[in-house]
Amino acid sequence: MIMDYIYKIINIIKSSLILVSLLTIAGCYNLLFQREGEAIGTEQEKTTISTPPSPEISYQERKIRFQNFADSLNKASVLSETDVLYQEARLFLPDTTLRPRSYLFGKRLARRDTLDIFFYEISQEDADGTSFNLVSFFPDGRAIDLIAVHGKTNDANLGISLIDQEIFELTYVDFYLSPEYFETDRYVDAPDSVKALQSTHHTAMQDYIWKKDYNETNHYENYRLNQTGKFEKLSRKFNPSLKRKFPFTSTRVLANDEIERYAVRDLQLMINEIYADYGKIFSRQKLNYYFQKQSWYQAQSEEVNHLLSDVEKLNIQKIQSRIYIAKQ
């Protein structure tokens, strides 16, 4: 009997020890995974926390700074790379990276409540050609759109005209001296000071060159500035009949003051000539009779509106408005 009790007591002790061991292991397991879970949670929190961004310049501050710059540039003459205003230009004007011995000239062409339009050019002493740029800006100086033209020689010139509130005309003119000119006695006998001049615009050099000594390149395009500040290139007819009385109405946008100089009869002919150049068959017998006598006219279709270029559509609209006003 005594031995039986002893065995029972030993078995109870063993069971208690096993139970204590299991509880201890379970407790350590829970504690371990609880701490790992906390560590993982902390790491995730760190990855989602970002350093607060430094305060940016407000829209109003950027606007004031840009307008001050724009006003100063508009009043300034030609700037060199050492001028403070040239350095400021690099913050706002596209393509104004600092270039050795370079010069900057810029002017405001138009200013509206929602945007500014600027023209500027950059040239270098030791490089041929000039960079011409027409750019639109938001009021705070952010560039919206850019038209860039690179002149091939230092004689290149880009003229920009504001035709209407939204229409620009860009005219590119350049001069190329012929290789034969440098073999003429006029060049050989010219003073070294004149030979150093490469510009045909320079008065001193014009005394030594003739018209046949150089070729002139003339090219122009029309652009519309839309409501978002983007420049839209207007299509035009590249090969209008030069025998027309008013062929230019198909190639460039007419200014209002230019249209006003013509009589109503001429304005009506301008419109009908545009249609006739596409072979329109007119319903009015008088018009058909007139154009049938023109050597350049070839009757093709009664409907040609879908063939008109952007420039022609705009000119027709402007001319019709002028005719309407003149008849009132």
Image (tube, rainbow, N blue to C red):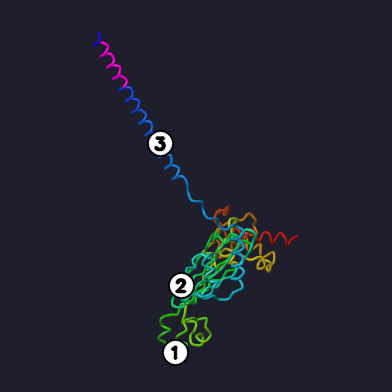
Q: Is residue 228 above or below residue 215?
A: above
Q: Which residue is mark 2?
A: 99
Q: Which residue is mark 3?
A: 37
Q: Which mark is residue 78?
A: none
Residue 105, percent from left and from top: 55, 73
> Is residue 245 shown to the viewer in this render?
no
Residue 254, percent from left and from top: 62, 65
- Local crowd at mark 2 within 10 Å, few (<14), some, or many (≥20)? few
Left or right: 35 as drawn, with respect to 60 = left
* Disc nearer the start of the sequence (1/3): 3
Q: Which residue is mark 1?
A: 192
Badge 1 amino acid? Asp
* Disc nearer the start of the sequence (2/1): 2
Badge 2 amino acid? Arg
* Residue range highlighted in magenta: 4-16
Magenta segment, prevailing SS (helix, strand or loop) = helix
- Residue occupying image coordinates x 63% and y 54%: 283
Q: Quadrant of the N terminus?
A: top left
Q: Is residue 296 above or below residue 19?
A: below
